Amino acid sequence: MAREKFHTLTEQMFYILLCLQSECYGMDIMEKIRIMTNEQVTVGPGTLYNLLESFENSGMIYETKVEGRKRSYLITDKGLRALEREYQRLIKLTDAYQQYVMKNGGVSNENNKA
């Protein structure tokens, strides 16, 4: 069975949807992500506009206005559900990590022993 599109989100996808909880246009989104992640995650214009188009086509965001070449977007209920699903998935991953570390007395790397 094929996996549903956007079943899991990349970092870039996650942050774009997170930003679109308030109306933003492309350059706003790129700047917000840069600041929000302390420059750890960047989204280039090509990636951003391809993802915005895909999100819009899938009903996860919608265009709110166009001013010349600037297009603004907002997240939809479908997009909010995808964002929440990804957030819950990440929590499960970190919980599993913490449980494993607690159970095994810490993280060790057997391959890098001196």
Image: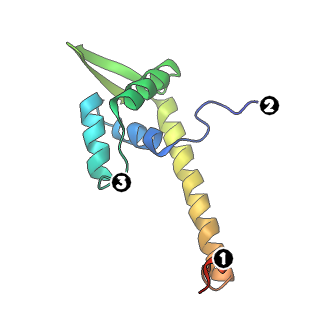
Given contact means CB atoms under 8 Å apart, are the residues at marks 1 and 3 in contact?
no
Instruction: Sort mark 2 into few (<14), some (14-19) or many (20+) by Cα contacts within 10 Å.
Output: few
Q: Quadrant of the N terminus?
A: top right
Give me the disc on residue 40.
3
The label on residue 20 is none
Q: Is residue 38 visible?
A: yes
**Which of the colour schemes (rainbow, by chain, secondary structure, one colour) is used?**
rainbow
Judging from the image, what secondary structure is the residue with disc 2 in? loop
Name the residue located 53 percent from the left edge and 38 percent from the top edge.
Answer: 81
Residue at the far left: name it.
68
98 relative to 86, above or below: below
Q: In what element is the residue under mark 3?
A: loop
At which x and y percent is residue 71? 28, 20
Q: Secondary structure at mark 1?
A: helix
User: 49 or 65: which is nearer to us?
Assistant: 49
Q: CA distance from mark 1 to mark 2?
A: 37 Å
Q: Quadrant of the C terminus?
A: bottom right
Q: Amino acid at mark 2?
A: Met
Q: Which residue is mark 2?
A: 1
Of marks 3 and 2, which one's residue comes earlier in the chain?
2
Q: Which residue is mark 1?
A: 111
| Residue 45 falls in image quadrant | top left
Task: Identify which residue is drawn at 50% across, 18% down.
Answer: 57
Image-quadrant location for residue 112: bottom right
The amino acid type of the residue labelled 3 equals: Gln
Q: Residue at x 58, y 34 (%)?
A: 6
**Which kind of residue does numbered mark 1 sit on?**
Asn
In x, y percent, where is residue 3?
70, 33
Inter-mark Cα distance, 1 to 3: 27 Å
